[in-house]
Amino acid sequence: MVLKIIVVLLFIALLISLTSGLVFLLKDMNSPSKRTLYTLGIRITLASLLMATIFYGLYTGQLGSGAPWDRKLTKEQLQQLNNQ
């Protein structure tokens, strides 16, 4: 549960960084400022942390997919599907 909260917080921080980068880009079009570049670095760091957290969660089994096309079938269920 803690890992899911970390993933959501990192995603929200990534969106905030993306928005602030856009604001800085639009405000600093005529002046030489490095704010847009700094937010790009923060965004890359946050994206890397988010991907590493997701990979760690998948590797340890704390995160998984609940999609209907990604279900894990038992041997009996596979045999039933093959017999139909």
Image: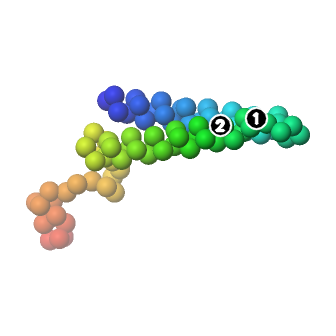
Q: Residue at x 62, y 34 (%)?
A: 17
Instruction: Give the number of callouts.
Output: 2
The amino acid on which the numbered mark 2 sits, given as a three-letter code, is: Thr
Q: What x and y, as percent, mark residue 10?
A: 48, 34
Q: Residue at x 48, y 30 (%)?
A: 9
Q: Is residue 25 above or below residue 9?
A: below
Colour theme? rainbow
Q: Quadrant of residue 27?
A: top right
Q: Is residue 54 left or right of residue 19?
A: left
Instruction: Identify residue for label 2.
Output: 39
Mark 1 → mark 2, Cα distance in angstroms = 9 Å
Q: What x and y, as percent, mark residue 80?
A: 14, 64
Label 2 crowd bin: few (<14), some (14–19), many (20+), radius 10 Å = many
Instruction: Identify residue for label 1.
Output: 24
Q: Secondary structure at mark 2?
A: helix
Label 1 crowd bin: few (<14), some (14–19), many (20+), radius 10 Å = some
Q: Is residue 35 left or right of residue 82?
A: right
Disc 1 to disc 2: CB gap under 8 Å: yes
Residue occupying the far bottom of the picture: 83
Compare residues 29 and 58 and report the one nearer the observer. 29
Residue occupying the far left of the picture: 76
Q: Is residue 24 left or right of residue 29?
A: left
Q: Sequence order check: which comes first, mark 1 or mark 2?
A: 1
Quadrant assignment for the C terminus: bottom left
Q: Quadrant of residue 4?
A: top left
